[in-house]
Image: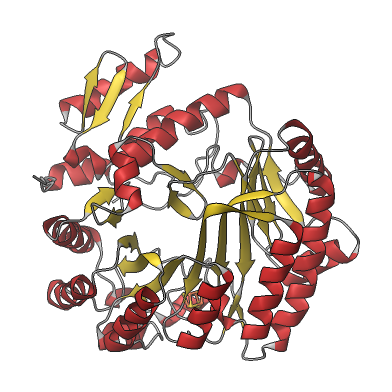
Amino acid sequence: MFEFPEPSEELVRRYDLSAPRYTSYPTAPEWRPDFGPEAYAGTLEQAGREEPAAPFSLYVHLPFCREMCTYCGCNVVVTRDSSKADEYLDHLLLEMDLASAKLGERRRLAQIHWGGGTPTFLTPVQIERLWKAITDRFSVEPGAEVAIEIDPVVTTVEQLALLRRLGFNRLSMGVQDFDPKVQQAVNRIQRAQDTATLVDQARGLGFSGVNFDLIYGLPFQTKESWGRTLERVLEIRPDRLAVYSFAYVPDMKPHQRKIDRAWLPMGMPKLGLFLQAYRSFLGAGYQAIGMDHFALPDDELSRAQRRRALGRNFQGYTVTAAKDSIAFGITGISDVMGAFAQNAHLLKAYYAAIHAGRFGTERGIETSADDRRRRQVITQLMCNFWVDLGSDAYFAKELERLRAFEKDGLLVIDGTQVELTPLGRLFVRNVASTFDAYLSKEGKDRPTFSRTV
Ligand code: SF4
C-alpha cells in the first residue's frame, strides 16, 4: 500500500535549501578547465586498454530546435534550416573517429541515448546517417536500451517507424503541461490529443518504457489547471513520468525574460503542485523512482528499484547503467574511468577543436578514491533510497549527522544501513548532500544549486 508523504510547512521551510541534483559527484561546479582534450583522450585510451570487453553507454547531443520555448533550460541552436544538422553530423562523425581510435578494441554498447535539443529535428536521411555512423564503429549489445528524446509537436509516425526499424526501443517525450494558457505563455503549443495519438502509434510500433517529462512551477499553473493536465496524463498512462521543477534563471537564460516573474507559482503553492503530482501518480499505481521520477510497477525501472539495483547516469535512471558513458556533440558529458569530461557549449568552439583533430573537451575532473566512494553512497540514496555505509566506519561522522534527519522522520538507521522513509524521499537531495565533501569545504564559495523542493 502506498503512503502519501505529508510534509509540514515547517519541515519544508527548514529543508528548502539549495542542493545539487547529484547527476554527478563531484558536481559540475567542481569541474575544471585544466581537464581538457588531452586528459580526456588519455582517459579513453585507458578505458580501451584496461577494460576492452566492458560495454559502455553512448550519448549523442543533438542541439537543434525549430523554435525556442521560453522555459527552456537546455543548450539549443534555434534554426529551421535542416542543412545545419548536416554540418553538425560531419563533426559528430569525426569526433566518433577520434574516440574510436582511442578506445581500441572497446566496442560494445549497452545503452544508446540521443538527446537534445530536438533529436527528431533530423530528417530521415540524417537519422539513418547518424545511426550508421554509430553502428559502423561500435556494436550494439542484444537487449541494449536504445532511447531517444522526441518532441511530439515535430515528430511524425514515419520518423517513429524508422527509429523503431533501426533499433530504438525507448522514447521520452517532453509534455510539460497540457493547459493552453500555460502552453501559450511558454511558446509551446502541443495538443494533448496529438500526444496521445503519438503514444498509441509508438506502442503499436513496439516501443516500451515510454516516458513523459512534465514541469511544475510554469506560468499560470494552478491547482485546477494542473489537476486537469495530470488527469489527461494518467489517461494516456505512460510507463514512466518525470516531474521537474521549473528553474527560472532569466539572468543566465535571457529568453526566459519573456516570462514575467509575477506569472509564476512560487514557494508553498509551487511545492503544492509537485505534491499534487506525487499523490496523483502514487494513487494511480506508479512507484516513485528517485525524487521526481515515477514508473508503473511492472516497468523495469520499478522492478530494479525493488531489487535495489537501479542505476543512474546523465540521461536519467536506468537498469543497464554501464560503468562508462561516452558523449558526443556540444555540451556532452562523458563519465569514463571515474573521470568526467564535458564538451564545449558553443558550436564554434566545438567545430574548431574537431577541425584541429582534437576533442572539444571544455572542462572536467579526475576523481579521487574518496570522491568515488562518496559518489557510490550518493547514487545508492538517489536511486534506491537506501544505502549500506559499510563496516569500516569511513562515514562515521556522516552517520552521526544523519541522526537529525532520523529525528525528523526522514530516514531510519539500522546499524550501517540507512533507508529513507516515504517522507524522506522528498528530501533525498538534502540527505545525499551530507556525503558531499565539497559543500562543507571551509572558505569555499558555495555554488548556486536549485532549491531542493
Ligand atoms: S523543444 Fe526542448 S530543447 Fe528545444 S527549445 Fe523547447 S524546451 Fe528547449
- The residue lying at 18 percent from left, 60 percent from top is 281
Between residue 235 and residue 366, name the one nearer to us. 235
Residue 3 horizontal side relative to residue 342, left or right: left
* Residue 305, above or below 409: below
Residue 271, percent from left and from top: 22, 58
Residue 103, percent from left and from top: 78, 45
- The residue lying at 14 percent from left, 61 percent from top is 284
* Residue 438, above or below 383: above
Residue 446 horizontal side relative to residue 188, left or right: right
Q: Quadrant of residue 429?
A: top left
| Residue 123 in view of the camera | no
Residue farthest along the right direction in this orientation: 356
- The residue lying at 52 percent from left, 51 percent from top is 314
Q: Quadrant of residue 432?
A: top left
Between residue 190 and residue 409, name the one nearer to us. 190
Residue farthest along the bottom direction in this orientation: 80
Between residue 22 and residue 392, name the one nearer to us. 392
Residue 327 horizontal side relative to residue 391, left or right: right
Residue 83, percent from left and from top: 72, 87
